[in-house]
């Protein structure tokens, strides 16, 4: 398919898609919107026609005896249309305000959230996806604007037809000239809109960096280090680079556009003046009446305005459709292969986990992070995984939790291949605390913990108990609003927990989840040694009938595990109890002694 044909096909597809969304989600407002745009564009022309009738009847009444009822009826028609027009304008504005929120904010955000949730973490890490997400967020307005430009074109097109037919009958040469001078403007508008789109696409990475750095400079939590390092000017330089490059090129395009627009205005104005001269000649010859002059003057100026308006809106409509294509590219992005169909119930007892001949490499990489791994974790076993940074420990967690599919081999849950299991039903059996856990600072302490099991009926007592197990209860109760405290100083009465307190709240959320398989990835990195010891004592003593997998660099937290697995370069090099590994006097024992020496 040729590029132009493909673009035309996309425009049609985008139009049908956005119309379908409009008439599905806001059918009454969408219908009223079309009527309103037709009315608003034809309003001046229809009003001029009615006013012309009134003027002619008033003049006829002055020049001789006429039925006064004709004048009164004309005035009533004018007043009725004026009232209708006003009400239609109010209704249109009201509808636009409602639909702009629904179609310009709520629906685009909902579709994006649903799509990202379906794509999954592995796909979201791809650079192209990140670029598409960035352009999607920048262009959410197109959901509302594509329909708005389309409805405007319908309204302007209808008004143009109403104006151009009688004008062509009266002044054919002038009408043709008006159409001809509009063609260059149409081509230029289309070209400029395309240039702006290409600039936005070309600047996506620069825009991403600039926006992220501005957000960093506006974040109070990050600003303290930036100020301490005196790095504000350096980091702001990236944003200024974005401003100077992106907006510099944009200003150049707009300057040229303004020049061409000015030339087109001069040409259109000259043709309209020619048409006015022609109307004066026709009036002098008695070909048209005074009232008709009012109508034809409105039609003459209207045709010029309608053509310019149609040209500008059509170019914007095509440009917006191109941006919509970028957004739909993300919404239509291939999702991971159809997940397994087997739905797991919540396990009463933990499952047997097996990894058989597992190899894994990240997308767009040839390096194997996990190499021919075989591992069995028995139901209810408490396993600790240790190793240097980059050994593959966190990657192993991602494979067990099915965030990433294995490159080869199998992950088995009670003998079932993880790929054959419906993802969310497996997630329901997992409780995972990542080292880069989320902080929901716009929510209360209660909600932060409750998110661990938010799809079930909330149990306030269990939430409090989870907070106690995580050593979070006491400081939460010290808050002014206790568990109802909003955890951000950006809100009136809110407070910001320390890094260690945030980690305890995240651990409380993990405890509250109460899943059969619990995984902790460096869970206590920001917690003091006493609190850490308390938390892990509770994990080892009180978490029964659950499989626990712990990743940690602190050997004091793993020595009581049933089994310790030592990872190195994606492979198991040692495993056993703490005592067994110390007797082995291998890598684990050496690292443990070094760490113990540091504490001593």
Image: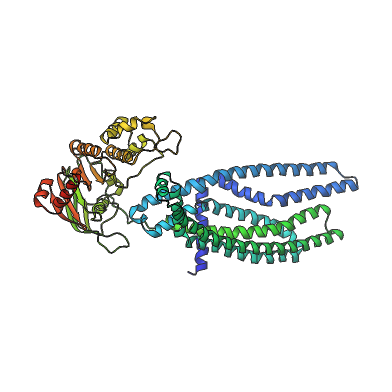
Relative to 379, residue 370 above or below: below
Compared with 8, 143 (above or below) is above
Q: Residue furthest right?
A: 64
Please provide percent x and percent y for residue 33.
59, 47
Q: Residue 374's image quarter?
A: bottom left
On the rendered structure, is 510 left or right of 34?
Answer: left
Residue at 86 percent across and 59 percent down: it is: 284
* Front residue of 63 and 321: 321
> Tell me, what colour scheme is on the image?
rainbow
Q: How many numbered tags mark residues here?
A: 0
**In-front residue for pair 490/317:** 490
Pick whichever, 228 or 450, lies toward us: 228
Question: Is 480 placed left or right of 417 in the picture?
Answer: right
Query: Can residue 327 be seen by looking at this rendering?
Result: no
Residue 176 rendering spot, x and y as whole percentages: 71, 66
Instruction: Point out residue 153 in the picture as x, y percentages from the top left corner.
Output: 61, 56
The quarter of the rendered structure image containing the C terminus is: top left
Closest to the observer: 264 or 313? 264
Q: Work out whether residue 384 can be spotted.
A: yes
Q: Is 257 left or right of 534, judged from the image as shown?
A: right
Residue 186, horizontal then vertical, whole percent:
62, 64
- Residue lying furthest bottom in this view? 2
């Amino acid at each position: 398919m040729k590029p132009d044909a493909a673009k035309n096909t996309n425009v049609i597809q985008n139009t049908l898609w956005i119309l379908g969304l409009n008439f599905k989600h806001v059918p009454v407002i969408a219908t009223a919107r079309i009527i309103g745009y037709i009315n608003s564009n034809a309003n001046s022309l229809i009003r001029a026609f009615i006013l012309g009738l009134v003027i002619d009847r008033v003049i006829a009444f002055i020049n001789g005896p006429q039925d006064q009822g004709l004048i009164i009826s004309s005035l009533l028609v004018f007043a009725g249309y004026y009232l209708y027009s006003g009400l239609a304008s109010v209704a249109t504005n009201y509808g636009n305000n409602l639909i702009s929120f629904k179609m310009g904010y709520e629906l685009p955000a909902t579709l994006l959230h649903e799509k990202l949730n379906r794509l999954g973490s592995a796909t979201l890490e791809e650079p192209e996806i990140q670029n598409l997400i960035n352009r999607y967020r920048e262009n959410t307005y197109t959901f509302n604007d594509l329909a708005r430009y389309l409805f405007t074109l319908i309204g302007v097109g209808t008004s143009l037809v109403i104006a151009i037919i009688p004008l062509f009958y009266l002044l054919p040469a002038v009408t043709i000239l008006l159409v001809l001078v509009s063609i260059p403007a149409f081509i230029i508008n289309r070209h400029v809109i395309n240039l702006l789109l290409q600039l936005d696409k070309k600047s996506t990475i620069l825009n991403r960096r600039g926006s992220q750095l501005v957000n960093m400079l506006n974040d109070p939590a990050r600003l303290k280090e930036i100020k301490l390092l005196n790095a504000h000017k350096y980091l702001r330089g990236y944003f200024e680079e974005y401003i100077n490059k992106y907006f510099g090129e944009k200003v150049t395009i707009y300057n040229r556009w303004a020049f061409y627009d000015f030339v087109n205005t001069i040409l259109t104005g000259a043709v309209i003046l020619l048409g006015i001269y022609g109307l004066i000649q026709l009036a002098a010859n008695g070909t048209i009446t005074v009232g008709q002059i009012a109508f034809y003057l409105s039609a003459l100026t209207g045709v010029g305005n309608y053509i310019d308006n149609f040209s500008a809106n059509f170019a914007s409509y095509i440009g917006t459709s191109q941006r919509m294509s970028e957004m739909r590219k993300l919404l239509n992005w291939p999702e991971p292969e159809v997940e397994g169909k087997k739905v797991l119930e919540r396990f009463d007892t933990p499952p047997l986990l097996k990894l058989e001949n597992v190899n894994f490499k990240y997308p767009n990489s040839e390096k194997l992070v996990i190499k021919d791994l075989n591992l069995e974790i028995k139901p209810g076993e408490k396993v600790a995984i240790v190793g240097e940074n980059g050994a593959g420990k966190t990657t192993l967690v991602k494979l067990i939790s099915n965030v990433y599919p294995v490159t080869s081999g199998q992950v088995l849950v009670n003998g079932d291949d993880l790929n054959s299991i419906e993802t969310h039903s497996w997630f329901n059996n997992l409780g995972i605390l990542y080292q880069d856990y989320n902080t929901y600072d716009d929510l209360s302490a209660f909600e932060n913990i409750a998110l661990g099991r938010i799809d079930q009926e909330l149990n306030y007592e269990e939430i409090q108990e989870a907070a106690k197990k995580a050593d979070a209860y006491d400081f939460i109760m010290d808050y002014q609003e206790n568990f109802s405290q909003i955890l951000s100083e950006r809100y009136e009465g809110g407070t910001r927990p320390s890094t260690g307190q945030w980690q305890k709240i995240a651990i409380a959320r993990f405890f509250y989840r109460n899943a059969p398989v619990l995984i902790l990835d460096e869970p206590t990195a920001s917690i003091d040694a006493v609190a850490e010891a308390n938390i892990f004592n509770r994990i080892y003593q009180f978490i029964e009938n659950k499989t626990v997998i712990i990743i940690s660099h602190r050997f004091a937290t793993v020595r009581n595990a049933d089994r310790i697995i030592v990872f190195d370069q994606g492979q198991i090099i040692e495993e056993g109890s703490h005592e067994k590994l110390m007797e082995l006097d291998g890598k684990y024992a050496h690292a443990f002694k070094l760490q113990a020496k540091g504490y001593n």
